[in-house]
Image: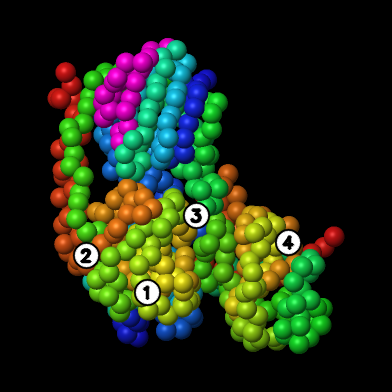
Amino acid sequence: MTVAEVTRVGWATVQDGGRSGFAGVGVPVSGALHQERYLLATALLSGAPDDRVPAVELLAGGLGLVMIAETILGVVGPVTLRLDGEPAAVGAALRVGERAHVEIEHHGRGPAYVVIGGWAPEATLGSVATDTFSRLGGEVIGSGYRLAGEPQPATRDRIGGFHLPLPEPSGPLRVTEAGHPTLSAFAALTWTVTAVARSGVRLSGGPIASSGSIPSQPVVPGAIQLTPSGEPIVLGPDGGLTGGYPVVGVVATVDVDRLSLLAPGDRVVFRVVDVESAARARDERRRLVARSMAHPDRLP
Amino acid sequence: MRSSLRSQWFGDRAVLVSLEHPSDRRDVVESLAAALPSHQVRTGMASVLVESVEPDPHLLDHVRIALTRGHDAVTTPVAPRVVEIPVAYTGADLGDVAQVLACAPGEVAAAHRAQEWSVAMMGFAPGFGYLEPIGPMVLDWSTVQRRDSPRSQVPRGSVAVAAGMSAVYPSAMPGGWHLIGTSTAHLFDPARPESPTRLRVGDSVRFVEERS
């Protein structure tokens, strides 16, 4: 059965929290570029963050849907939302009726996430995440794409739940060490974004000394590779599991989501922090997000 | 012995251990996996990465303690699993590789079959194992570098060599290694979540002549 059909779409893929547990055999984690927004969206459906809930990750342009059956819709991110032509709330669990027209326009920074009650695309290795590098999981969504599943009446009591506004983090991107001697020299420079993709963010503005290539080693999202051309690449969730370029530092986990807000031409500055303060900042952010999440006691 | 291995932060939720000898890899991986069962342990050519899901200021201490203790719990060393991969030596670059190694194409094929290989790391793509030569080498594989210009599409099953290593492409993808043969082996099957890949780190690999 189909819960909705895409009438028009910009740049969008199917994502979830990621394909974890298979990195040891070469399968990247992939998943939502902005985990915080994604998990907020899933909480609208599930009542709590749930990294297995499928979401449309909209990176640019619009998304039009026609609902086949009545269900729940939740949208989180820098978008405007209209239901049958009427403005509707972003960051809230909404009831959408049979044949309802959903129109979403992207107008800000970074990805938006759309969750739909009952949508259940096929999973690969336990995840629906679209890995644009390994070409695993879901797919790039095109016009006419059908969202398969069964409408979800069980969670209709969630309708009306909403998130409180959450401030965007600001300031330099925090970066932690990876045993490379030039991290402080790297962090002293102002960098310019030259390209963005799910595989990573390319920067220019060096030069910074690079030792060419190293024996291939495991890498993680947020790792900043120094390429021989002098243009660093900050790896994203589809950036691969191993790399042969020196890693100058790794963006602190608390700031990895912010990489998805960057656009070509942006200026980027980094600040080196130690692991203790990076971990503390992450804990504080998680508490802030938890407080802003829709809870049953906030339902009208 | 292993306490002398260098370990350092790799971001706020991972620690990278540098290996002195590739032969330490298996011991180090087993020690870390046994001591930190809720963490992910991945190998590189000369390193091992221990990863947690969230930032953990104590991870570096935990890794160092695990390396000092070694893997006492693992009493008897288990012999590596041997995986046989059938190959037809018909690759487009077989002649070029023979030229670099100053021998005939048939000798490259024979040496590749005679060589014992070991899965050093998995990566690049799902199911892609980096195979390093183990034991005596008839030919010096390290003299074969990557191709000057990578192919935009290497067919699935291609058997390749480069930078002292060998590999089998689990699916069609871009690649810069020299192609010396093709294999019918299926190295990646996402429909088998309990074991989606044929190769695992530490496996011993033997190439055998494809029977037609």
Residue at point 48% right, 31% down? A9
Q: Mark 3 lies on which chain?
A: A
* Tag 3 secondary structure: loop
| Quarter of the image where one finds residue B206 | bottom right
The span shown in magenta is A76-98
Q: In this view, does B193 lie to the left or right of B90?
A: left
Between the residue at mark 3 and the residue at mark 1, the CA separation in whole angstroms equals 33 Å
Q: Give amino acid for label 4.
A: Ser
| Quarter of the image where one finds residue A101 | top left
The coloring applied to the image is: rainbow
- Badge 3, how many Cα within 10 Å: few under 14, some, many 20+? many
Residues indicated by labels 1 and 2 sit on the same polypeptide chain:
yes
Q: Is residue B146 left or right of residue A168?
A: right
Residue A281 seen from this side: yes
Q: Give amino acid for label 1.
A: Pro
| Quarter of the image where one finds residue A57 | top left
Residue annotated with mark 1: A207
Between the residue at mark 1 and the residue at mark 2, the CA separation in whole angstroms equals 18 Å
Q: Is residue A262 left or right of residue B160?
A: left
- Badge 4, how many Cα within 10 Å: few under 14, some, many 20+? many
Residues indicated by labels 1 and 4 sit on the same polypeptide chain:
no
